[in-house]
Amino acid sequence: MNLKQIRNFSIIAHIDHGKSTLADRMLEITNTIPERKMRDQMLDTMELEQERGITIKMQPVTMKYTSRGQEYTLNLIDTPGHIDFSYEVSRALKAVEGSILLVDATQGVQAQTLTTLAMAQKAGLKIIPALSKVDSPLARVDEIKEEVMMLLDVDPDEILCVSGKTGEGVEVLLEKSIEEIEPPQEILPDTTSSRALVFDFEYSSHKGVIIYVRVMDGSIKKGDQMIFGTSKRKFFALDVGVFKPDAQSTGELSAGEIGYVVTGIKEARVAQVGDTVTLFKNPLEVLPGYMDPRPVVWASVYPESTDDFEFLKTALSRLQLSDSSLSYEEEVSGTLGRGFRIGCLGMLHLEIIGERLRREFDLDLIITSPSVTYEVMKKNGEMLTVYSSALFPNHGEVGLIEEPWVEIKIISPSEYLGNIMTLLYEHEGEAQDTETFGDGRTELVVMMPLRELMRNFFDELKSVSSGYASISYEIKEMRSADVTRMDVLVAEEPVAAFARIVSTRRAQEEAEAAVEKLYKVLPRQMFVVKIQARVMGRIIASKKLSALKKDVTAKLYGGDITRKMKLREKQKKGKKKMASMGKVNISHDVFLKMMKK
Ligand SMILES: Nc1nc2c(ncn2[C@@H]2O[C@H](COP(=O)(O)OP(=O)(O)OP(=O)(O)O)[C@@H](O)[C@H]2O)c(=O)[nH]1
Ligand SMILES: [Mg+2]
């Protein structure tokens, strides 16, 4: 295929600014999808994406479009807007030459507008700015244009106005993209070999790993023997084709094109995003790949039924083949048995992983409350990286603790600043910088412990700003942390799964909340059960769950009072014995209820 007739681009924007809806109109205009098959957010192919109305995974699609008598192949990659999925965006950007930067005309520039734009600029991409949702009665076109002009240093007439709802302006946007985005170029135009960048993959039980590639040099044909540059695994290209957005076999993918290659590989961890595939008999050098994503939060996942352990293991390895940002390691817990510690890019990511495991693999799971990573130096000089609360050393052994801090950027209408400042204080935030941003809005730069960001900060920010504030964050540095382990004891025994790492200044509050919660969900036993929270070797919250009264004498009608007394005496002894054994059987149901917010 002639490179000059190819254009590769992505759509980037803040969450919900209308990327997938704009893509729908492009699919229609280019007749990529017949009208009768069209539905809203066509590129959100996952059931969860449709249900929640958000894009989770990037989705490439190949379209044909004729402009001024010339037919073009347009490869579009729709990207997610939510911050937890920005690793998807960064990978998509390495496969294209340009990006449409969409700004919602009813909302204006938001935090993720800035971060995704910075990513695209760093990748050296041509930026095509456009306002979306201009059909809306709430659209403030002139005002928002000003914001974009400041951001990009462009003239107002360079900012297009589109509506994914009505289709207004979409053809103009396509024409402009063809005009302004550079066609792809080969790095080695004369090569007889081929190579491609792997930017994503999926797994099919029939076909094995299917890699999503951007061909950089030469062309990949069905039947070619290929090799992964880094993992060195060989395979035959069993099928080659493009996304329409369903896979459509073409037999060949040439330089500049975006499509898929079926590898037949069934084992996990061979295909890596960012790896290069090249012709086996004449391999080319490996292309620069991607930085591995750094997990932000860790949580433990256990099957509700211990028999499901192997199945959970398989499920995670499959899931990793459709979500390259997921990492996990095996872990054993005294109470919950064998499970995994999984690393995620944020709370929504963790929630989506849990939901996919339940749905796509029909697994019943216990997911512990998430924790960030702590670097602990023990008094004996030993260094530990702790991801799991239960493994956090005892207070007496701890020398120094460090935890990750993030730089967060918040954009909000200025009238909510007071509320936001209070919230920041509650979450140990330190304001660094404020700047007025456009009309009546303020941009705040704040440093905060990641631990506090993960403590429901996003939801609280939404609520104190009536949904108007937007946020992005980046992990910046490690700082010393004033945190400690809180144990929850049931009948005087600590329950590992309930251990949490809490900030010392909030220890009392957390301890009382944990005891209260367990008091509510733990069924009564045959004997009195103490529920306690312990911090730094001291019990700081405690509650007694009274015993279940089972009247052992009920069956004795009238009769002998001494016999009744004897029975009661016996029962008392029995209870005492049970209590002294300290065995309270905590059911999975109780664990589940405790893990829930
Ligand atoms: N009025 C109006 N509403 C729109 C338009 N485009 C999208 N919407 C609505 O805005 C919401 C978000 O649209 P999406 O296309 O899913 O946004 P997105 O940018 O793909 O969202 P993420 O992928 O989750 O970041 C939906 O409720 C759409 O119906 C538009 O042009 N006009
Ligand atoms: Mg979307």
Image (tube, rainbow, N blue to C red):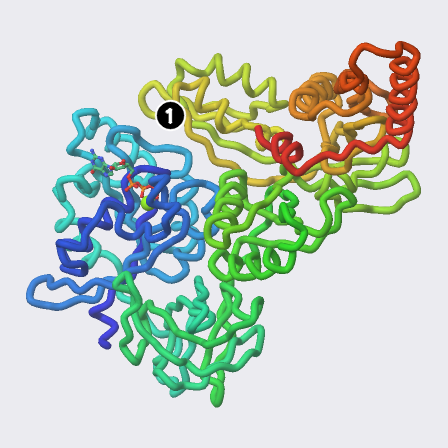
Q: Farthest residue in the bottom direction?
A: 281
Can you give x and y, in whole percent of width and height, for residue 117 in the image? 38, 44
Query: Where ligand 2 lies, by quadrant?
Result: top left
Q: Quadrant of the C terminus?
A: top right
Can you give x and y, in whole percent of width and height, for residue 419 in the image? 48, 14
Which residue occupies 18% across, 55% down?
Answer: 37
Residue at image mark 1 = 437
Can you give x and y, in whole percent of width and height, for residue 196 in the image? 42, 73
- Report the front residue among 586 and 414: 586
Q: Is residue 197 visible?
A: no
Which residue occupies 58% across, 74% down?
Answer: 231
- Report the front residue among 146 and 165: 165
- Report the front residue among 564 and 416: 564
Q: Is residue 444 visible?
A: yes
Q: Identify the amino acid type marked 1.
A: Phe
Crowd tier of the residue under label 1, counting other residues whose Cα lies within 10 Å: few below 14, some 14–19, many 20 or above: some
Hey, which quadrant is residue 555 in on the image? top right
Q: Quadrant of the N terminus?
A: bottom left
Can you give x and y, in whole percent of width and height, for residue 408 in the image? 52, 32
Which residue occupies 71% across, 17% down?
Answer: 512
Q: Is residue 484 above or below residue 116?
A: above
- The secondary element bearing badge 1 is classed as strand
Residue 397 appears left or right of 388: right
Residue 46 appears left or right of 379: left
